Image: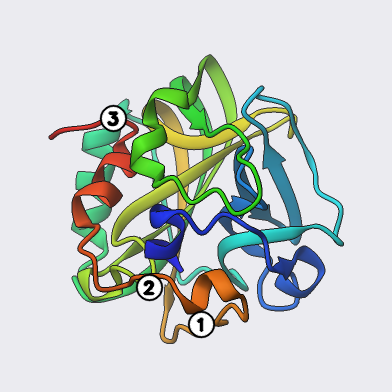
């Protein structure tokens, strides 16, 4: 669950092989972090904190992931230059249900991308993710081509997941990626899949059983999503 990951539940418990039975598109976090995950066209890729990006071993585990079988309802082509802010503004204009769940695939050319990945942690290390922001590794790309895989989730999804926009990048060569921090898009195609349900697999672990979900982690979630503390 989103709040669990933010609060320090990093140990993997769900194998990628089973995850792919529930979707061919999505994002998540690897076992004990060490980067970011992307699920795209039925394959799972990990971008480590070194920037190395590769197909994962199906027997390995994820600590958090959201996936769906991507079946786009709408498609848009945008040829003008968009910043991250203007891209989200455009998406807001077409994703009219403020309480809707949307899976979003963006493919095209980006004059600039900035991504991040967290380093690995030791087993049962529950340091909150917001306290590890100084350990992030950032990656910058110019004139890149590839895919953004992500979601826009409503406010009522907080704690279970992360509300708002959340995107991970996968380069066209499948050798670079990470969580999106900033971007400038030049020519992109946007595909939208509006979802009508959400199922949760509850971890059967001792750490999860004793985790404090009552704590308000809203500010931590925002900081981790932005990649920095403060507003």
Residue 160 disc label:
2
Residue 97 in view here = no
Q: Which residue occupies the foreground of this view, 127 or 116?
A: 127
Q: Position of residue 210 (x, y in %)?
A: 45, 75
Residue 201 position by quadrant:
bottom right
Residue of label 3? 228
Mark 3: which secondary structure? loop
What whole-number distance in Å separates the C-alpha atoms at marks 2 and 3? 22 Å
Q: Is residue 148 above or below residue 69?
A: above
Residue 190 in view here = yes
Q: Which residue occupies the foreground of this view, 181 or 133?
A: 133
Screen quadrant of the C terminus:
top left
Pointer 1 or 2: first along the chain: 2
Residue 119 disc label:
none
Q: Which residue occupies the foreground of this view, 106 or 196?
A: 196
Residue at left offset 66%, top offset 72%: 23
Pointer 1 or 3: first along the chain: 1
109 vs 186, left or right, is right
Mark 1: which secondary structure? loop
Residue at left offset 81%, top offset 48%: 56
Residue of label 1? 200
């Amino acid at each position: 669950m989103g709040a669990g990951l933010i609060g320090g539940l990093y140990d993997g418990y769900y194998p990628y092989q089973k995850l792919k039975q529930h979707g061919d598109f999505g994002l998540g976090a690897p076992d004990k972090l060490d980067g970011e995950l992307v699920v795209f066209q039925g394959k799972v890729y990990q971008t480590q904190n070194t920037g190395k990006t590769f197909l994962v071993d199906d027997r390995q585990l994820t600590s958090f992931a959201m996936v769906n079988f991507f079946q786009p309802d709408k498609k848009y082509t945008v040829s003008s230059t968009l910043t991250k802010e203007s891209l989200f503004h455009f998406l807001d204009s077409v994703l009219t249900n403020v309480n809707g769940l949307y899976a979003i695939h963006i493919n095209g050319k980006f004059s600039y991308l900035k991504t991040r990945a967290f380093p690995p942690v030791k087993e049962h290390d529950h340091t909150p993710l917001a306290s590890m922001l100084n350990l992030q590794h950032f990656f910058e790309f110019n004139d890149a081509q590839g895919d953004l895989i992500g979601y826009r989730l409503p406010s009522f999804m907080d704690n279970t997941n992360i509300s708002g926009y959340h995107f991970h990048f996968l380069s066209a060569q499948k050798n670079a990626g990470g969580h999106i921090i900033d971007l400038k898009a030049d020519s992109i195609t946007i595909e939208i899949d509006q979802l009508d349900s959400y199922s949760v697999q509850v971890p059967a672990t001792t750490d999860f059983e004793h985790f404090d979900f009552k704590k308000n982690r809203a500010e931590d979630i925002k900081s981790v999503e932005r990649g920095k503390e403060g507003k």
